[in-house]
Every structure is written in C-alpha cells, then in structure tokens.
Amino acid sequence: MHMSLGILGKHYVHLLMFTTFCIQMQHSLLKDITHESHSWHVRVRATRFSEYNSEDNPPVLLRLDFVIIDEEGTMMDAQIPGRHITTFKPILKEDRIYDITYFEVANARASYRPVDNNIMAKFTKYTKVKEITTIMETFPRYACKVVPFETLRARIDENKVLSDTVGMLIAISPVSMVRMRGIEKPVRNVQITDGRETLPVSLWGPHATHFDAEGLQAEANKQPVVMLFVGLTSKIRERQLTLYGSTICKWYSNPMIPEVVALQQSLSGKAHEITWFGQAPKKKQVLNATIHDIADLNPHDIMGNTYMVNIAIKRIIPGEPWWYMACDKCKRSASKDGTSYKCIRCGATQAEARYRLSIHGVCPSDLKNDDATNADFVFFGQIAEELIGIPALTLVASVQGHHDLVPIEITRLYGREMIVKVSASRRSLQMHRVSYQIESMSIITSKITDKFTPSDSTQLPMLANKTVGAEPSSTLNQTDIIEVYFIPSAHTHI
C-alpha cells in the first residue's frame, strides 16, 4: 500500500511538472499583460522599428524602439535599451513574427506614444527571442489604429499618443531646406484626401529625403495610391490643419487593410494622378555618348548629367577592392571597431558585405586594343549583384574575405558588352579621374563569347584563369538585350 502511494505520488509530481511546462509554453495575449508578472510569453509581429540617437557627432544609438502586435491586433510599444542593442538588433527584423519571453513590463512613455497602451515591453539581458516561420495568414501585418480626419482635428496639439490615418496621395512637393535653430533641415510636404477634405502632411529630416516621390507618382499613373501614415501629430499652421510626421513616423502605399480598401472603393472612378506643387524637380536629360566623349571630363562641369553609353568591360581597376563593408543603415563604408563595425557618418554599428565593382570600360570595337581609351565605371550593391548573379556575402565568403582575390564569377565578366546609363559620382570630385556610377544597364547577351582574354588578366590574384569575352558589334538586336534596371539611392555614393 505504501509502495502504491509512492508510485502514485511520483506520477502526480510528473503530471504537475508537465502541466506547469505546458502552461509556460502557452503564449499570452497582449491585452492580458500586466505589471503583476515579468515572465510573460507572447507571440507577436515586430514592426515600425526606429532608432533613438544622441546629438553627438557622430550620434550614439541610445535605444531601439519598435511596436509589437499580436494575433488579435492588440499593440504595445517595445524598447531595447542601448546596452542590449548588440544582442537583439541582429536577430530582430521588420515584419517578422517572434515568440518573446522574459521582458520587463514598464510604464509607457509619457508623450508621443506610438500606440495607445499604458504599458510597454522593455528587453533585459534575460529576454528570449525565437522567430516563428509558420504562422496563420490572418495574423495582422500593420500595427495601426486608423482615425478619420475629424478625429485628427480634435487632437490638435495633443502629444500623448501619436495618430494614424489614411488618405489618397494627390500632391507632392520637392525637398527644400529650412533653417531651424541655426541648422538647415530638409522638408517635404505631401497632400492626402479622404474624398471630402485635403490635408497636408509635413515630413522632416530623413523622412523628407526617404519619401519615394517619383516611385509613388509612377504608381499613381496606374492606380490610386492610398497612403497609410502612422506616427503623426496634428497642428494648426497658417490657419490650416497640418499633419506632421514624428521622428518615428512610417508610411505604406496601398496596404491591404479595411480602411484603405474602403477609401479605394469610395474614390473609384475619380482622378488619381499625383501632381507636384512648389518647384517641381527638373527631369534629367539623358545624353547619348561614347567612351571617348566622357573618359576624361571635369566632374565639376558634369555633376548631375546623365549619359547613355555602349561599353565593354575591359578589366577590374587594379587596386580597387570589388567589395566593402557597408553600414547597414546608410550604406557608407563602415570601419572596424574592435570586434564589430561602426559607421563614422551615422554611428550605426551593423555592417554587411556589399559590392563596389570598379571596372575600366572601353568601346566594344576597341576591346582587343590594349591602348584604347577607357573610362572608369562603378557597379554598386544591387545592380552589381544583378550583373554577377551571386549575393555579395556568398562571393566574399568564397574568397574568405580577401579583397585582393578576384573570383571567376567576376573575371568571366571581362568582355561583357552592355548599354549603361551613368552619371558622375560625387566621389570623383576627390579622385584623380572622373568615375561614373551605373544607374541601369542592358546586357547584350548575343555578344558573349570565349574568344577574349584581357592581356593583363593576371595582374591581380585570381581564383581561375579562364575568362569569357565579347566580340565587338556596332548593331543591337532588341531580342539580344536583358533589361536590368536599378536606381541607386542617394546613399550609394561612397
């Protein structure tokens, strides 16, 4: 009898432990989170990331803010203090879903809250994060609480909680510079409408320059562009209600949420083109040119010009690394800082391998002439990846991170003929010779042969000695062209 009770007791303990484990594995909904515990387990989408930097030069990243939203659409502010950023920033990505356990339940900030919730999740050294790759399609994607224009009017000068709204984009201004407190800042104004009223939205600083005005205007030529703006404040400017994008403002074009769909339906059949107000940006005229025309121009005279040139790749420029460590934020060069990297320009501490392929280009008819006139061209980032066909990190790993080893995936490009759209890089102003950055390219596939081997192909260490080349041609066949188009951002000038 005593033995039976002992066995039953053990089974009871095991059952109790298993039950406790199952309870711990179940995730809680955000609406149930309270100050009563700091060992909550939640399943949420992480979105609306923003960095809070010091005013130092360069700035120091003090904390990482973002919003979490659960399967029911409940939202909460989340924060990673500066001392834990290196631990969590590399593993948290925009719009991914995570199981998060062990965070401090803290009071939300007193003002400029991104969501209307009195508590927030603050990460600690004990916080556990696990990405969930299989999730139901109904899990909300956008963390927002859309309010109509009349509610925005009622929130004038209120700053406790930021506002979210939707409106069809109808007008955009160019970026202008405004002096505030002795510092010039970029500003761009846009106009949105709900079909009854039109409101201006003022975007400042990086928001002004990151707003893809040309891309959205092109999209509006095909369909109405309804914008979701999150993180706005309401003010009266010149007797008119004006919305201002806060430092944590975000925007999305035509997101699939009920408020956007409803507005699209209500505005169906109405004009949806986007106009410019203020001084509209001047469209660059593309000039047809040859290698001989552009090889040795003064970059000061041609800065801002765009050229269309037929070139063949002669060789990689000696002494110019074909990749670099780029700041994950601004894409400028990042410097080694102990065991990590740091961007001198913006202070970010995350870096990634990125292409910067510098080549000598010649006229296709001069490909076999070692004394032919050549010009310097640079393929950056995504457009270089389109040319090479392999992600930068993969190719860098194949040479174990060496800058002076040129893999066959690059040497086989020698002789490749293409039509390129280029402009002089800002970097040229400090170089001994003008360098042209590739904005788009059309590769002429029928001209690729194995008959061309550059005479100086052994000048740099290589992983292979066989190259692929091109026969010169003066005529183009439309069926022989592969279109590869990429417009680099303003940050790609290193």
Image (cartoon, helix red, strand yellow):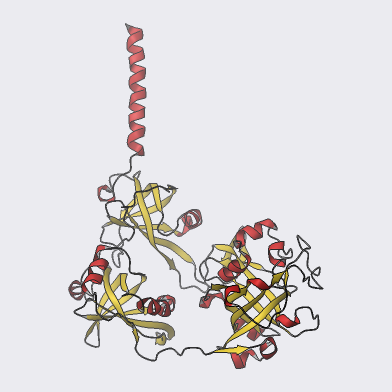
Q: Is residue 41 left or right of residue 450?
A: left
Please tell me which residue is depicted at 36% across the width and 79% down the height of the picture: 221
Q: Which quarter shows the C terminus?
A: bottom right
Quadrant hosting residue 369: bottom right
- How many numbered marks appear? 0
Residue 161 showing in the rendered view = no
Quadrant hosting residue 120: bottom left
Quadrant hosting residue 433: bottom right
Residue 243 rendering spot, x and y as whole percentages = 28, 77
Q: Nearer the viewer, residue 24 or 414?
A: 414
Q: Nearer the viewer, residue 82 or 317?
A: 317
Please tell me which residue is depicted at 38% across the width and 76% down the height of the picture: 219
Please tell me which residue is depicted at 71% across the width and 85% down the height of the picture: 432
Residue 312 rendering spot, x and y as whole percentages = 69, 77
Residue 457 showing in the rendered view = yes
Q: Nearer the viewer, residue 246 or 492?
A: 492
Residue 333 rendering spot, x and y as whole percentages = 60, 70
Q: Residue furthest top?
A: 1
Q: Which quarter shows the N terminus?
A: top left
Residue 89 rendering spot, x and y as whole percentages = 48, 57
